[in-house]
């Protein structure tokens, strides 16, 4: 690594290369997380426990990549002295990698719970979950594209769209409670569906975190707008009264 | 900040001061998060919605502190060129602050859901929650002490104790499902209790993350042991069959 009397040019070139490698690793992590989410939802739809098990097992690959990213970040920070935008880039990489790792965890947890769902009769509402999942997937895909292209506007647009996911989640939450009340046999499967839906809602939150990091990376300032983020079901007292 | 021709001694002293300030901020964050968790649980026990609302509002203070920590980390990385142990220290600070911020979020969510619980008749199992909460609190307190004292053994000991929290959570999860099956009127409050219990289980996970960071900080290696971490209820197919 040009350890013997490196020229300034060498250092700069190598630094760019390393940064490029780092963002490449993160894109790869993101693609794996998306593929995992996709496979998890297919497994839910097709009631395919074998596929679901593969998703659970494959989560380790994302964890390994996150470990690699952290390692590269430490090395970059130690060997170079990044300033301003470069430093923002590296810290954003660290944070975005952590968010992708969490997205992978949630996808794996969806798959894990689908295995349990397959042990009982199909629950009609299992089919509402993929709709929520597609919204979550699109958000993740958008923020990863925004990160790849350094596009703060695209990040901001995705950020605002998380609200749609939250609304769909709240709707599904209410429906699941109704099912549980109609028939006690629905309680166990619907509880798993509740947690699966919650996982998807959390994936949306992590996508907005990534969007915030991309925005900060490009502009050096935080997203100024505020909007209610997160889970409105925390304050659902009855299924008819959301506040 | 000694910008005019600083002596080497000045830089070193100031660096230590800044690092000290950083870890001080994190301890303060941790104490606030613990106080928040304590207040949230008191609010649950006493069915005190006003106190619960205060907890929800106070969460912003932790978020602000985490922002300060991130800011200080960026400054430390930019102005100094930390290596080896110093760099580990700074990265650990960044990660531990993020974990504490999440713990604060979960405490606030427990408080938020308790407000909803207070709108319906008391659910007996609301009283099982504080037991779980005390376990979570103890874990957080232990890992913060381990961080303060640079005590990897203490961190490791807390890390292994998360299993107890997971077991208690699984037991409560089963009990809550039973209650829901007994009487449909229990479904909405017990769903909130399920999510509150899940929040406490997640607080335990973040405490183990902190423990892992303390261990790494001291030894420069990962905790070698492995144990099943997290939520066994993901694979609870019936309340009698945990696997």
Image (spheres, coloured by chain):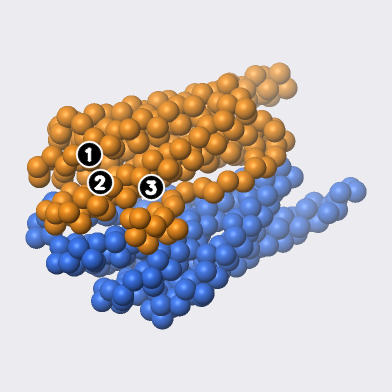
Chain colours: A blue, B orange
Residue A107 in the image: above or below residue B9: below
Same subunit, labels 3 and 2: the answer reads: yes
**Callouts 2 and 1 close, C-beta under 8 Å:** yes
The residue positioned farthest toward the right in the image shown: A4
Please report whichever mark, 3 or 2, sits nearer to the chain's N-terminal start: 3
Whole-number angstrom distance, CA of label 2 to CA of label 1: 7 Å
The residue at which mark 1 appears reads as B126
**Callouts 1 and 3 close, C-beta under 8 Å:** no
Residue B243 in the image: above or below residue B204: below
Q: Residue at x 46, y 31 (%)?
A: B139
Secondary structure type for disc 1:
helix
Disc 3 chain ID: B
Please report whichever mark, 2 or 1, sits nearer to the chain's N-terminal start: 1
Residue A198 sits in which quadrant? bottom left
Is A219 left or right of B51, judged from the image as shown?
right
The residue at which mark 3 appears reads as B170
Residue A160 in the image: above or below residue B208: below
Q: Residue at x 30, y 65 (%)?
A: A189
Disc 2 chain ID: B
Is B22 left or right of B192, judged from the image as shown?
right
Residue A99, position in %: x, y? 48, 55
């Amino acid at each position: 690594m040009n350890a013997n009397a490196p020229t300034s040019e060498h250092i700069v070139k190598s630094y760019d290369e390393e940064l490029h490698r780092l963002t490449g690793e993160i894109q790869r992590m993101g693609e794996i997380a998306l593929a995992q989410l996709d496979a998890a939802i297919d497994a839910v739809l097709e009631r395919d426990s074998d596929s679901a098990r593969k998703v659970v097992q494959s989560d380790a690959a994302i964890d390994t990549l996150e470990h690699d990213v952290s390692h590269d970040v430490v090395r970059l920070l130690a060997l170079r002295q990044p300033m301003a935008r470069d430093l923002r880039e590296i810290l954003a990489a660290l944070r975005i990698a952590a968010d992708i790792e969490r997205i992978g965890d949630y996808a794996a947890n969806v798959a894990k719970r689908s295995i349990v769902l397959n042990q009982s009769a199909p629950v009609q509402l299992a089919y509402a979950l993929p709709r929520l999942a597609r919204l979550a997937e699109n958000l993740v895909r958008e923020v990863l594209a925004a990160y790849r292209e350094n596009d703060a506007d695209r990040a901001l647009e995705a950020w605002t769209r998380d609200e749609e996911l939250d609304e769909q989640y709240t709707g599904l939450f209410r429906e699941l409670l109704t099912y549980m009340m109609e028939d006690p046999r629905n309680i166990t499967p619907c509880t798993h569906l509740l947690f699966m839906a919650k996982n998807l809602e959390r994936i949306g939150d992590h996508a907005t975190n990534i969007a915030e990091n991309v925005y900060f990376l490009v502009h050096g300032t935080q997203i100024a707008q505020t909007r209610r983020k997160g889970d409105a079901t925390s304050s659902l007292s009855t299924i008819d009264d959301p506040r």
